[in-house]
Image: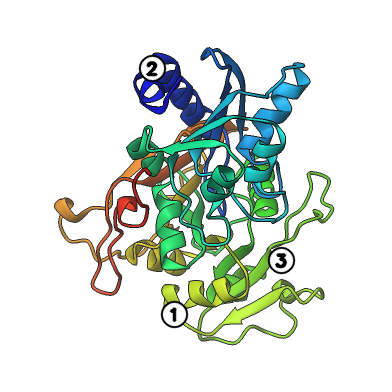
Amino acid sequence: MNHLDMLKNAAGQQAMEAALAAALRGPRGANPLVGAVILSPEGEHLATGYHRGAGTAHAEADAISEARRQGIDTAGTTMVVTLEPCNHEGRTGPCAQAIIAAGIAKVIYAVDDPHDPAAGGARTLRAAGVEVHSGLAAEQARDLNREWFDAVAAKRPFVTLHIAQTLDSRIAAVDGTSQWISSPESLADNHGLRELIDAILVGTGTVLIDNPRLTARTPDGELSQHQPLRAVMGLREVPEDAAVRGSDGRFVHLPTRDPAEALGRLFAEGARHVMVEGGSSILSTFLAAGLVDELIIYLAPTLLGSGTAALNDLGITTLADAQQWSWDDAGGGAVRTLGNDLRLHLRPTRAVTTKNSVPRREAAEYVTGGH
């Protein structure tokens, strides 16, 4: 089956659709959402894989492992994947080498990998005699990871913004109490997110009022194996006895009110996925700057009527300029029930332009077309 046949062939189209659907099962963050499907030489669907998050097998390796679990010989097969197979050694091995070792004869992927350390997989595959083509469902694949493409192009971390609020959008009562607005199930979910991210960021006001630890903990209260870098942004000093400082050296104070500057510093520290938690000033600052790639809201069935609002002024004066967000099915669904709470998962719908920020650009500006 030649390249033109595969692009037009129903099996190839269906395989890419299945790969895109599989990719959505993974979480957004430092790594792109990627799905892969292995087809027999006759176009039969043999195995599917997807990336489950940092440190886990990439989609290509996951699909190959699935085929092996079923006793399927992958020699001479075709792999259809949503992103160019990676070419670098990170926490997992390079997918290009895994594909070669599996004897896969053809690879068809949607878009090139813009991440310099990982790019070049197609070249490596061709050098090993694998037939490689790109461009199938490129537009859909770019849209799948448009925020990740943005972050890679800007050389900044992917940003998740997290809000735990009441039905009337309050994150604390008049007396400042906020523990706990969210249900135990929502808190457990949040700590699961903390295990996946590279850094967690709050403002100095949150530290001075709540004195949070910002650690990732298991359901029984023990520290998780992976701990994010604990970052505090703001011009006020962080007290020497603040819980956020800890004793493991994984604390940084960012003496700035500029979110882009804070992200640049965290990127330099090696953070590729940052979760912003609050309070309302820092949440609003990142939203107003158009620097939020993913929004996660834990909505408690509680009313306060007064107290601290989740957000401050975003500089929006007319409905036409309102920020638009779309429900995001990635990583478990757009709306989930956690105890008594609703967990809402959203991604930006369109560009966010402000006086002090560079507007988002389409991922197509960063990714070259098919070969």
Image point (67%, 68%), residue name: 229
Q: In this view, does 204 lie to the left or right of 151?
A: right
Front residue of this view, candidates 357 and 53:
53
The kind of residue on which mark 1 rests is Arg
Give x and y (percent) for residue 57: 70, 41
Q: Is residue 366 left or right of residue 182?
A: left
Disc 3 to disc 2, how far (Cα)?
55 Å
Density class for disc 2 (Cα within 10 Å; few <14, some 14-19, many ≥20) is some
Density class for disc 3 (Cα within 10 Å; few <14, some 14-19, many ≥20) is few
Using the rendered view, name the quadrant where residue 206 is placed. Answer: bottom right
Image quarter hosting the C terminus: top left
Q: Which tag is nearer the camera, tag 1 or tag 2?
A: 2
Front residue of this view, candidates 285 and 342:
285
Mark 1 vs mark 2: which is more N-terminal? 2
Q: Which mark is residue 213?
A: 3
Q: Is residue 148 above or below residue 111?
A: below
Mark 3 vs mark 2: which is more N-terminal? 2
In the picture of the structure, the residue carrying the numbered disc 1 is 257
Q: Is mark 2 on a helix, strand or loop?
A: loop
Residue 293 visible to the viewer? no
Front residue of this view, candidates 254 and 75:
75
Q: Residue 9 carries which label?
A: 2
Density class for disc 1 (Cα within 10 Å; few <14, some 14-19, many ≥20) is some
The kind of residue on which mark 2 rests is Asn
Q: Is mark 1 on a helix, strand or loop?
A: loop
Q: In this view, does 1 lie to the left or right of 31?
A: left
